[in-house]
Amino acid sequence: MLGQQLLARAPSAFEVVGRDLPEMDITEPDHVQREIEDIAPEVVIHLAAMTAVDVCETEVESAFSVNGVGTGILAAACDRAGVALVYISTDYVFDGESDRPYVESDLVRPISVYGRSKWWGEQATRERCPRHTILRTQWLYGPGGPNFVDTMLRLAREGKPLKVVDDQVGCPTSTFDLADGIWEVVTREPGFGTYHLSARGEVSWFGFAREIFRLAGLAPALEPCSTADFPRPAPRPRYGVLRNLHLELRGGDPMPAWEEGLARFLADPSRDA
């Protein structure tokens, strides 16, 4: 989802080359090195990841191979070529037990295989490519893949009663807004290091669904429920809200409030293209 928007929303001043499987496999060192040498980029924005959170719990080796080892391979290749690396990470590196939004310096404590594998990817990025920028984000939705917004709209139009979790809190982030935010960071160059880059504000999944339906002019039967009502293989952070503190301190936070991002997303005709 995010890769498509980065390509579509790239500034005209940039020449952007996209790579995906099977063209490029980050777990194959020779393949990665050859692609880096052939393209000769100034910056690599690394989006490749195993993001099926529940699947990661049973396919542990695959999760760490892609999110951890593969990231290390790509980071090392970038360093050898003198290329800056931007790595997209996640709120799942935190345990969700905070009583306030997480900032970049907060203690990391992932509680799922997915979170641990992404943390390994962060560490590999730091160790193998000093010219790196790590961007943590959360609750992504957008065209190009299964996402909460389109799922809710489809179920509502099918006339099905809905129960949505109300005790997990985060910040929904549109891939439209995140792609624009990434390009803003790449252009501005606030300095290498770790940054949070999510929409501003916070809401539960239930509250998010309610706003989706309000903006879409729908009124399905909607009830809140607890995480315990829908047990999943992977534990979710109870409270995963990120604050973009480092960007606030280094020139300003480019991300909108989640409500603004959702309204723009629903009104954008390109999302159905």
Image: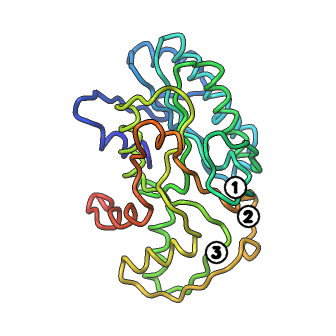
What is the spatial separation of the Cα atoms under label 1 and label 2, in whole angstroms?
A: 7 Å
Classify 10 Å Cα crowding around label 1: few (below 14), some (14-19), many (20 and above). Answer: some
| Percent coordinates x, y for residue 20 in the rendering | 46, 35
Q: In the figure, is residue 186 to the left or right of 194? A: left
Which amino acid lies under the numbered mark 3 shown in the image of this protein?
Asp
Classify 10 Å Cα crowding around label 2: few (below 14), some (14-19), many (20 and above). Answer: few
Question: In the rendered view, would you say 94 is above or below 158?
Answer: above
Question: In the rendered view, would you say 118 is above or below 72?
Answer: below
Mark 3 lies on residue: 166
Given this view, does label 3 or label 2 mark the residue nearer the observer? 3
What is the spatial separation of the Cα atoms under label 3 and label 2, in whole angstroms?
A: 15 Å
Question: In the rendered view, would you say 200 is above or below 231?
Answer: above
Q: Write the residue at 55% across / 34% down.
A: 134
Q: Which residue lies furthest to the front in this view?
A: 249
Q: Marks 2 and 1: in contact by CB < 8 Å?
A: yes
Query: Which of marks 2 and 1 precedes in the sequence?
Result: 1
What is the spatial separation of the Cα atoms under label 3 and label 1, in whole angstroms?
A: 19 Å
Mark 2 lies on residue: 232
Q: Write the residue at 57% across / 34% down.
A: 194
Q: The residue tagged with tag 2: helix, strand or loop?
A: loop
Q: In the figure, is residue 136 to the left or right of 96? A: left
Colour treatment of the image: rainbow
| Percent coordinates x, y for residue 193 in the rendering | 55, 29
| Percent coordinates x, y for residue 3 in the rendering | 42, 42
Mark 1 lies on residue: 54
- Nearer-the-camera pick, 168 or 272: 168
Q: Write the residue at 65% across / 32% down.
A: 121
Q: The residue tagged with tag 3: helix, strand or loop?
A: loop
Which amino acid lies under the numbered mark 1 shown in the image of this protein?
Asp
**Which numbered dot is residue 270?**
none
